Image: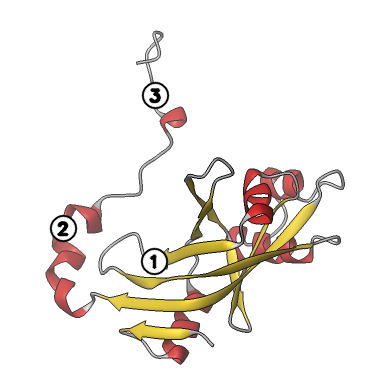
Amino acid sequence: MTTVKGAWSRSEIETFLDESLVPVRLGCHHSRGGLWMLSLWYEYTDGTIRCATSSGSDVADFLRADDSVSFEISTNRPPYMGVRGSGTASLSPDEDKELLESLIERYLGGTDSELATMLLTDEREELVITVEPRRLYTWDFTDRMQTAITDSPAASNPEPSSPKQTDRGEDGR
């Protein structure tokens, strides 16, 4: 049974998770005892959060050793809102890359791109990460952030660009 606390009902949580196109931030235990966090595309299905990863990825190795996870799916601009929680993760093969293809459609709008071609290559073995939430906590700061929605630097500032894409001089600075 999943414990739910916070600003939203279960149906509001489901609506947010179905409609949100930000990645899930997934936290797990590193093989050397530390913590690890990464962002993954996800879909929300039957009360679970499902992600795809390469079978040889670090996160797959970490989850094989310890299936405890934390996660957050939240907006990046005001008004801040989202869902965070904890649970367990299981791994299963995505032999036909059905989940991966679904995630590519969801986040890229189709499979006609270099990234999609690279991810869907026959040589790449995929896994499904299925997160079974035990606890969910939601927050929604819409009411108290009305002025921040339009007046704050966070609201009007575009997402940062890659440092690799920055125009640099010959010395790399």
**Relative to 163, 68 lies left or right:** right
Residue in the picture at 18% in, 80% down: 143
Quadrant into which the N terminus falls:
bottom right
Residue 135, picture quadrant: bottom left
Q: Name the secondary structure under disc 2.
A: loop
**How far across and how far down the image is residue 105, in percent?**
67, 64
Quick one: label 1, few (<14), some, or many (20+) residues within 10 Å? Answer: many
Alpha carbon separation for disc pair 3 and 2 = 27 Å
Alpha carbon separation for disc pair 1 and 2 = 18 Å
Amino acid type for the residue under numbered disc 3: Asp
Residue in the picture at 16% in, 65% down: 148
Residue that mark 1 sits on: 74
Q: Name the secondary structure under disc 1.
A: strand
Lower sequence index among marks 3 and 2 = 2
**How far across and how far down the image is residue 160, in percent?**
36, 43
Residue that mark 2 sits on: 152
Q: What mark, if any, has residue 167 been given in the picture?
A: 3
Q: In front here: 151 or 98? A: 98
Question: Contact, CB < 8 Å: mark 3 with mark 1?
Answer: no
User: Depth-wise, is mark 3 or mark 2 nearer the camera?
Assistant: 2
| Above or below, comparing residue 169 to residue 112 in the picture | above
